[in-house]
Image (tube, rainbow, N blue to C red):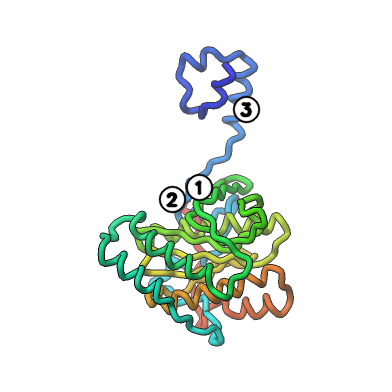
Amino acid sequence: MNNLFDKPLNQLTDEEKSQLTDKQKKAFKALIGSAKPSVPFSSVTLNDCVRPDGLALDLRFIEPIAVPAPTLHIPQEIIIPVPSDFLCEHLLTVQKFYVLNNEKACRMLIDAILLEVLKSEFNDSLSGFCEVKNDWEGTGFGYTGDVDYMFGSSKTKSVDTMDSFLLVVVAKKEWPDSAIPQVLAEAGCLLKKRLAAGKNTPVFAVLTNGLLFRFFAIDTDGVVYASKTHSSLSEILRWFTWFMTAIMTEKAIGDSLTQLRNCFGPKNPIFSKKIRIQK
């Protein structure tokens, strides 16, 4: 009978339920009553992202602005990297011989670009992880699912603690509307875990379909900042270079974080009301 507890509650048959003792039925009822509502990352909406009993993100610079202006700005001193011959040839080969009509195909491009980033001279401690479980719940609402890619430092080469991670990358064939809430929720959950561990620095996120890339930062106050969409390989690598450099501010305080936050915000004022939950 104990194996009944290994099955999700909603998968128990009436016959199996009848086998439960009164004590077990009471335990199941308590579990059902205490469960908080949650949503998988793939189904997250912008309203889910701003729930005060959940992530409570501040999306004043994101949708629904008619033409969102970039609010994340790369420092001018960040050099423009030259893509390696291997990367350029690989990307051209993939696009020549594969039809990029689904997420799995697009990941061949993403994998190659991320490998180039991790091999760069600007990285000496970060590793790439795939399909990282990133569930988190607030006071009344939760979020569940895996992150496609996550960059972080781990001496054991395992996802032992989430507070050592700072960058999430989401691969989505659908571009960009349905994917934006997902990448923000995944990065928001990472931010909450870091804050709970006493790591008071921003987190970064990238949304891509393999050809187009958009970069995000979420500050410790929950305000989300975003770049415009990029398609130039050199510019994409430049943004990753900056993120890799900025990630090093995890251990920094004072001036380093101040310089980082100088890259956050609109260059021209944007007047937009914060998104409210639809009732």
Q: x and y percent of residue 216 in the render?
A: 51, 68
Quickly name the residue at label 2.
Answer: 42
Position of 131 relative to 249 (above/below): above
Viewer-side label of 3, 1: 1
> Which residue is at 44% across, 74% downward?
236
Badge 3: how crowded within 10 Å, few (<14), some, or many (20+)? few
Disc tally is 3
Compare marks 3 and 1 and give the one earlier in the sequence.
Answer: 3
Q: Badges 1 and 2: C-beta atoms under 8 Å apart? A: yes
Q: Amino acid at mark 3?
A: Ala
Is residue 67 among what the camera can see? no
Quickly name the residue at label 1.
Answer: 145
Distance, label 2 to label 3, CA atoms, is: 28 Å
Mark seen at residue 172: none
Is residue 118 among what the camera can see? yes
Q: Amino acid at mark 2?
A: Ser
Q: Is residue 96 left or right of residue 255?
A: left
User: What quarter of the picture does the N terminus occupy?
Assistant: top right
> Which residue is at 46% across, 52% downward?
44
For label 2, the SS is helix
Viewer-side label of 2, 3: 2
Position of 268 relative to 25 (above/below): below
Compare marks 1 and 2 and give the one earlier in the sequence.
Answer: 2
Q: Which of the pair 61/12 is nearer the observer? A: 12
For label 3, the SS is helix
Q: x and y percent of residue 250 in the render?
A: 67, 68
For label 1, the SS is loop
Mark seen at residue 30: 3
The answer to which image quadrant residue 196 occupies is bottom right
